[in-house]
Image: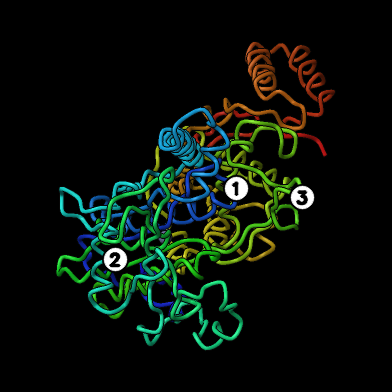
């Protein structure tokens, strides 16, 4: 199969050609660890996990390096630490906040079925020169000053945007336009209002590191330039890598500034060959906002009943996210989650407990086309239920086609879905519309036993009892021809 990816910088879909197929290199901006990650934060994590899986499939599990950083130095973290642990010395309080939040993030994304990246560097470990010689922020800033791209002023080290003729190429914001709208008075120490902070001095009770410019802390953007170079520097020492990803909101200023720093420090024509950005997420048609009461963390969706009155399995959240193409805006709705859960019910019914087999060429082709997950999902339906009326009407299936459960499982696996068996899926925690799944499953088992001993009076009684609870049973056969009963909530 051929992989084509859309590149935000060149604004075109291109065939993906890695610099070194024996080590395909991808960097994705990770979380700032001061608070629970919200569902919008989950989108890039899931999207680039799918790309990571796809690259591993194409180039081999040991030939892909995926780096996702953890930003554990940020003024938002300082504020949170002072608020939550007022009795502690600030640095101790900061450590408590960042460790707790980072652990929570790892637990959240694991529940969404995401593989751990190859490296998850923490910014605080890359501020000053390292014993292992990997790239660090202070050295990078020194290089930028030495090459005439940065200067010291007003207690800061600033990047000089005018030293880079094509600054602004990623976001399409030209310097002249930015200058016109800026308020110069606030930033009197800057040569250009668009100049951004590489280093700033810390007061005594702020976190700080010793540097040639005094005790201070790094700006946000320089972190990613240092940590990407630390793990993704090329075999030729050229520091260009294959893919850089993140949310659309990071294009400006964060990625624009990463590009400026990395290219100017390393003297390279580009930082990464493909810039990939996932679209925005809104909730029930509105921009997510703490003030609108439509703000949901991953943890709340998984472990509380705040969204739609119930807990949601991580796999449902994952599928709901992948039903929309990653570059499109996504509307996150209770209905969307219900639909995703229904799809998974059907797919698990189709796979039973089979082992994964061959992968479907159609699914791979869909993913190869700039990760067209909605199309891949249609193909998965086809493998699960070739006779489904909707698909037949849409010309997607032909008479006589049989379900392909082993292919379905293998093909869904590359999306990080259908990793469990049907029995595990049915045993998942969670309640649908006030119906206790565990209770329904035990009723179904009792009914199957009654049927097996030909006690149809009892089996009908159980069916009626479930019907009274709003549960409709459907008897069918699994892939091996064994009788199987599925259920759904009557609408
Ligand atoms: Zn970044």
Left-right relation of 488 to 318: right
Q: Mark 1 points at which residue?
A: 39
Residue in front for this viewpoint, 2 or 65: 65
Q: How far apart are marks 3 and 1 (CA)?
A: 15 Å
The number of numbered badges drawn on the structure is 3
- Residue 303: name its quadrant: top right
Left-right relation of 300 to 167: right
* Pointer 3 or 1: first along the chain: 1
* Colour convention: rainbow
* Pointer 2 or 3: first along the chain: 2
Residue in front for this viewpoint, 57 or 6: 6
* Pointer 2 or 1: first along the chain: 1
Q: Name the residue under label 3.
A: 292
Q: Is residue 180 above or below residue 219?
A: below
Q: How far apart are marks 2 and 3 (CA)?
A: 41 Å
Mark 3, Cα crowd under 10 Å, few <14 / some 14-19 / many 20+, is few
């Amino acid at each position: 199969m051929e992989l084509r990816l859309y590149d935000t910088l060149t604004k075109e879909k291109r065939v993906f050609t890695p610099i070194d197929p024996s080590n395909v290199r991808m960097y994705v901006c990770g979380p700032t660890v001061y608070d629970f990650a919200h569902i919008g934060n989950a989108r890039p994590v899931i999207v680039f996990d799918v790309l990571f899986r796809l690259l591993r499939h194409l180039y081999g599990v040991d030939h892909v390096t995926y780096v996702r950083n953890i930003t554990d130095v940020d003024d938002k973290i300082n504020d949170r630490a002072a608020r939550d642990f007022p009795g502690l010395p600030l640095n101790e309080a900061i450590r408590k906040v960042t460790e707790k939040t980072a652990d929570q993030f790892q637990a959240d994304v694991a529940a969404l079925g995401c593989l751990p990246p190859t490296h998850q560097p923490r910014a605080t470990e890359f501020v000053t020169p390292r014993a292992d010689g990997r790239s660090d922020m202070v050295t990078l800033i020194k290089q930028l000053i030495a090459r005439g791209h940065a200067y010291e002023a007003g207690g800061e080290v600033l990047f000089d945007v005018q030293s880079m003729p094509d600054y602004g190429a990623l976001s399409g914001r030209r310097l002249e336009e930015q200058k016109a709208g800026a308020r110069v008075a606030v930033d009197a120490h800057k040569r250009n209002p668009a100049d951004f902070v590489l280093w700033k001095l810390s007061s005594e009770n702020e976190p700080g590191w010793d540097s040639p410019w005094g005790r201070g802390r790094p700006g946000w953007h320089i972190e990613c330039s240092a940590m990407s170079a630390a793990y993704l520097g090329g075999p030729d020492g050229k520091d260009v890598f294959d893919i850089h990803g993140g949310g659309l909101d990071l294009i400006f200023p964060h990625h624009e500034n990463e590009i400026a720093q990395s290219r100017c420090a390393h003297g390279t024509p580009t930082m990464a060959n493909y810039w990939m950005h996932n679209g925005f997420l809104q909730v029930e048609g509105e921009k997510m906002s703490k003030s609108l009461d439509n703000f949901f963390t991953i943890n709340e969706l998984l472990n509380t009943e705040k969204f739609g009155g119930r807990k949601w399995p991580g796999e449902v959240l994952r599928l709901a996210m992948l039903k929309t193409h990653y570059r499109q805006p996504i509307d996150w709705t209770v209905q969307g989650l219900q639909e995703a859960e229904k799809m998974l019910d059907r797919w698990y019914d189709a796979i039973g407990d089979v082992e994964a087999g061959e992968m479907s060429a159609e699914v791979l082709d869909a993913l190869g086309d700039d990760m067209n997950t909605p199309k891949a999902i249609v193909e998965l339906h086809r493998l699960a239920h070739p006779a489904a009326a909707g698909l037949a009407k849409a010309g997607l299936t032909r008479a006589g086609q049989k379900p392909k459960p082993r292919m379905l499982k293998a093909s869904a696996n590359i999306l990080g879905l259908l990793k469990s068996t049907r029995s595990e899926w049915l045993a998942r925690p969670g309640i649908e519309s006030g119906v206790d799944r565990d209770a329904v499953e035990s009723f179904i088992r009792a009914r199957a036993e009654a049927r097996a001993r030909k006690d149809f009076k009892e089996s009908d009684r159980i069916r009626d009892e479930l019907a009274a609870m709003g549960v409709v049973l459907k008897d069918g056969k699994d892939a091996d021809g064994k009788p199987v009963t599925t259920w759904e909530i009557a609408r």
